[in-house]
Amino acid sequence: MTAALLVGCFSFSAYASDDDGTHVLPAVSGVSTVASYAAEDDGVAAISATEPDYLELCEDAPVEYSYQLTYYDDDEAHVGVDASFTISSGGEDHSFFASGIVDRAVLNDSITLIKGPLYGSFSANGIDYDFTAGFTKVEQGDAISIGLVLTSADYACQQLYSFGTPIMTEDVQSALAAYRAKLAGESAVEGAPVHEDTASPYAVNSLNYVFSNYGYGAFTPPKGCTVSGNGCRVNGFKEDAQDRIMVTLESYCRRFDSSKFPSGTFIDAYVDSYTIGLRRTGDACYIATMEEPALLDGSGSTTTSEQLNVIFAAAGSLLGKLPSPYNTGASLIINILKAVNKPASVSLSVLGNHSFVRVQTALGSELDFDSASIPVVFQLARPSGNTPMVFAGEGYGKITYLADLVQAAFYIPTEEASFWISMNM
């Protein structure tokens, strides 16, 4: 496969900054062909005539693509990417547009890696899809790879495809490994103080959490999909004395391995982003806050990893107070915190009817919590008065995994895992 690039390599420093502090590079275009990562024989019976006509792209279908990069004066660690591509398959042209802000990491003097998920939506045969386009590029060249994950709105079908030029060569993998090792060393030194238990008006050391309920979020059913089964699990715990609910989220990174990608060269899989939240389903009581409310502004704005450290500063203590077997991973939580102590973005919403935290990790985080859950505590409240009330709600969590291959990066979302929970107040 060769890419016919129409525009050469550019250095963003050669262009004057726009008034808004950005450098927008000229678009780069090319052609490629599609590779499919569907299982050769998924053991599912033939689709009946009454089933939806889900899109299936042909192997080696031609692709025309174009992308444009935007650099930011005040943020050298991220790059904006707009990408469009048209795939000709089955006698039809399918056009996609995706955008996102991805990571930019200087791995060494000769390799600067640009990598991350782009997002978009798409319709075909009357069916709506959300999709991620895993964008990978070395800044010193024009070549890119795209890992396309199409997920139908009903979550009944998920397809994985790639096109472009394999970027994650042995040289790039080695440089990235050294970069990650350097980050891990810096995190162990600079991040140590934030993992110590600190006094807080919302301290949890003396509380007793009781397991209440759980739920699973699946990978899509294995109809032409490489990975199936449970994709994440959420657990709900109650602390009646202080009217608190804890939601913990577990990952399943170990479900990814080379056998799931027989036509590709598997490198590794991590958690790329996750969400943990609590929704109110009744009207009597409400969600007052999450941990350390003084540092959560409730605006839903994106913040830095410093706020993430605050939110999970007492995570080791939280897990240590859970009943067996849910406390078995408590000793591993420190490693998780070190992983997310690298540059990350945190979206927060603290509202009475729905509160959540969403974490987008950064390149190099290598985050998984297969063996140790990530916890978030929600403080409940009730209107004034002595009449007994009941809080009714739904705890939930969701994960998007990065499955990294030499050929492309796939950002694979799970279904939302949820459970019902109630508490007398």
Image (cartoon, rainbow, N blue to C red):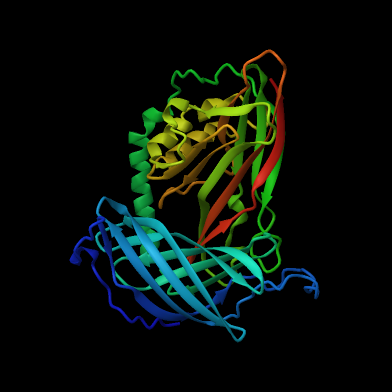
Q: Where is the C terminus found, in terms of image quarters?
A: top right
Which residue is painted at 72% across and 17% down in the image? Answer: 388
Closer-to-camera residue (167/418): 418
The quarter of the displayed image where residue 212 is located:
top right
Q: Where is the N terminus found, in terms of image quarters?
A: bottom left
Closer-to-camera residue (143/382): 382
Q: Position of residue 222 (x, y in %)?
A: 70, 63
Instruction: State whether residue 57 appears in this view.
Output: yes
The quarter of the displayed image where residue 9 is located:
bottom left
Q: Position of residue 188 (x, y in %)?
A: 37, 36
Q: Is residue 32 above or below residue 43?
A: below
Q: Is residue 30 above or below residue 101?
A: below
- Number of numbered discs present? 0
The quarter of the displayed image where residue 68 is located:
bottom left
Closer-to-camera residue (262/86): 86
Q: Position of residue 345 (x, y in %)?
A: 42, 45
- Residue furthest out toward the top: 386
Which residue is painted at 52% across and 75% down in the image? Answer: 95
Q: Is residue 242 above or below residue 83?
A: above
Q: Position of residue 147 (x, y in %)?
A: 50, 67
Instruction: State whether residue 175 appears in this view.
Output: no
Which residue is painted at 41% across and 65% down in the image? Answer: 136
